Image (cartoon, grey):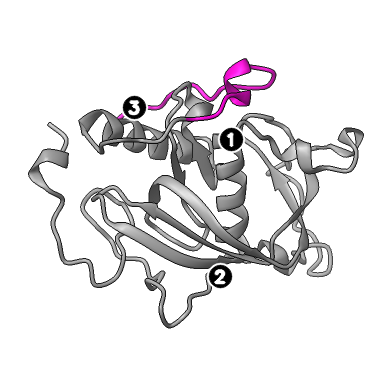
Amino acid sequence: MAIREILQIPHPMLRQRAKRVRAINDSVLRLAYDMVDTMRDANGVGLAANQVSELWRVVVIQLPDEDDARIYINPEITLREGERRVEEGCLSIAGYKGFVTRSAWIRFRALDHTAKTVKLRAEDTLSQAMEHEVDHLNGILYTDHMEAHEKLIKVVEEDESAPEPDDADAAQDDDTAATNGTDADDTPQASHASESGLWLPEQDSRNTPATLKLK
């Protein structure tokens, strides 16, 4: 696969609404796999297709505690519950972060890269990442949710030669913990390794159809 350029604000494509994918063909899969490579190269948690100049409703997510990436095609958030304040950044607004209000948990559905329908209840990092990426597909940036744009915080890269901080200084907010929730009637969110390094839903014993395999 390939690493693609990530668009930066104020590129107009970041404000355009992406189109639904009608068929999961080789072109869509190549885009998705390129997005996974691009996201990993940029040390990101998620990426939407319009961030790499493609107006299709495709997102990729890799949670910090998982080895495999997730591909979601035509993702749709069907329910949002609760509110929480979280710290958020964006690969298209490099070097800055801010605080926004996100849902406590969501339900969403999408197709995965094998064309299987996935329905999940998500919370914590997965919920936040999905809301962030679906916003991208609708031309919305996380800064649109901020109370004041001047509250953006410039990210300062840590000096690797600096001494280790005290335990108290190194404490992290629990909101950044990467744990996923499921209901009994939802598809479990366990990770399953595949040869392509992609997440597959549990109990999905089907192989990728020949028509969907990359040539």
Q: Which mark is residue 179?
A: 2
Res. 71 visible in picture: yes
Check residue 67 for magenta coloring: no
Which one is earlier in the sequence, the residue at label 3 or at label 2?
3
Residue 177: x and y in percent read: 63, 66
Q: Which mark is residue 138?
A: 1
Q: Residues within 10 Å of mark 2 (few under 14, many from 20)?
A: some
Specify whether 185 is left or right of 173. left
Q: How many marks?
A: 3
The secondary structure making up most of the magenta span is: loop
Q: Is residue 118 above or below residue 58?
A: below
Residue beneath label 3, please? 2
Q: Nearer the viewer, mark 3 or mark 1?
A: 1
Residue 213, position in %: x, y?
15, 40
Quick check: 99 left or right of 205?
right
Q: Is residue 155 visible?
A: no
Near mark 3 (Cα within 10 A), the count class, few <14, some 14-19 or many ≥20, is few
The mark found on residue 147 in the picture is none
Q: Quadrant of residue 157?
A: top right
Which segment is the magenta one? 1-18
At 54% across and 55% down in the image, what residue appears? 77
Q: Is residue 69 above or below residue 166?
A: above
151 or 49: nearer the viewer: 49
Quadrant (top left/top right/bottom left/bottom right) for the C terminus: top left
**Answer yes or no: do the residues labelled 3 and 2 have beta carbons within 8 Å?**
no
Identify which residue is drawn at 49% across, 51% down.
76
Instruction: Estimate the spatial distance between the alpha carbons at disc 3 and disc 1, rounded to whole Å.
Output: 25 Å
1 or 2: tag closer to the N-terminus: 1
Instruction: Give the percent coordinates (x, y) of residue 192.
Output: 30, 65
